[in-house]
Image (cartoon, rainbow, N blue to C red):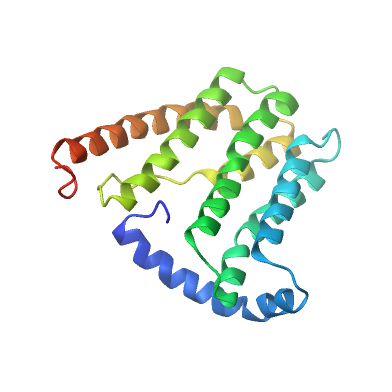
């Protein structure tokens, strides 16, 4: 369960295999400490909440460290689950939810801490979070949709840079990608509709 198309999935599997091997010693240590994948996921979400809600006046370096740690831990629960041979669709869905939640929280934080345009933030977060489930559904049903830009980590980076430099770069990024993901949302809806219109026989042309 993911939002990668067939071409991307081959590359993602190769990267995941390398990452799992690289992180194997750390994964084994966590397992010996009785730390389970969902513990890592939940702790990552706590770091996200802290990083997006912390009163950030003169604390942007701390915010950056918290969000970076959230991203690192978000990529660790999967390797631990596979090491324990307990990876499943339920865990994958939990991981995806925790993974994408950061977009909503950081977009909201940008309006509060940086004064970003709230309309742009709402449109960006809603279009992104509406599109991602459709991309996952399309992959499950083997509906071909266009390859899309994954802005999430870059979005966090620009948010932190905006805070550190005290200039709201992130609002321009949100407005641009609100339009981008709205377009892709309509595209995914159209392709899924065409797929089912033709009785679910392969991807729509």
Q: Position of residue 52 (x, y in %)?
A: 73, 38
Name the residue at 60% across, 41% down: 101
Residue 168 visible to the viewer: no
**Residue 116, position as x, y percentages in the image:** 64, 23
Does residue 100 appear left or right of residue 108 in this picture? Answer: left
Q: Is residue 84 above or below residue 66?
A: below
Question: Which residue is at the front of the view, 40 or 70?
Answer: 40
Give the side of residue 86 with respect to residue 128, left or right.
right
> Toward which corner of the image does residue 172 lie, by quadrant?
top right
Q: Residue furthest right?
A: 58
| 127 or 40: nearer the viewer | 40
Kindly indicate the quadrant of the structure image that contains residue 83.
bottom right
Q: Is residue 65 visible?
A: yes
Instruction: Give the position of the N terminus as an image quadrant.
Output: bottom left
Asked whether, in this view, residue 38 is left or right of residue 3, the answer is right
- Residue drawn 47% across the image and 69% down it: 15
Image quadrant in which the C terminus is located:
top left
- Residue 26's x, y, as percent? 69, 76
Residue plotted at (53% across, 67% down): 87
143 lies above or below 130: below
């Amino acid at each position: 369960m993911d939002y990668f198309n067939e071409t991307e999935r081959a590359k993602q599997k190769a990267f995941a295999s390398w990452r799992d091997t690289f992180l194997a010693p750390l994964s084994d240590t966590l397992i010996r400490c009785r730390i389970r994948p969902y513990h890592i996921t939940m702790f990552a979400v706590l770091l996200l909440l802290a990083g997006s809600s912390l009163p950030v006046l003169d604390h942007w370096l701390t915010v950056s460290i918290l969000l970076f740690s959230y991203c690192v831990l978000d990529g660790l629960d999967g390797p631990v689950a596979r090491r324990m041979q307990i990876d499943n669709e339920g865990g994958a869905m939990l991981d995806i939810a925790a993974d994408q939640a950061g977009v909503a929280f950081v977009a909201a934080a940008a309006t509060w801490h940086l004064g970003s345009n709230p309309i742009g933030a709402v449109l960006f977060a809603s279009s992104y979070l509406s599109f991602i489930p459709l991309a996952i559904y399309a992959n499950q049903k083997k509906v071909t949709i266009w390859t899309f830009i994954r802005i999430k980590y870059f979005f966090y980076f620009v948010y932190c840079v905006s805070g550190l430099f005290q200039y709201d770069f992130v609002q321009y990024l949100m407005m641009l990608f609100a339009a981008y993901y709205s377009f892709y949302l309509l595209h995914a809806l159209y392709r899924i509709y065409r797929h089912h219109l033709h009785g679910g026989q392969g991807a729509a042309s």
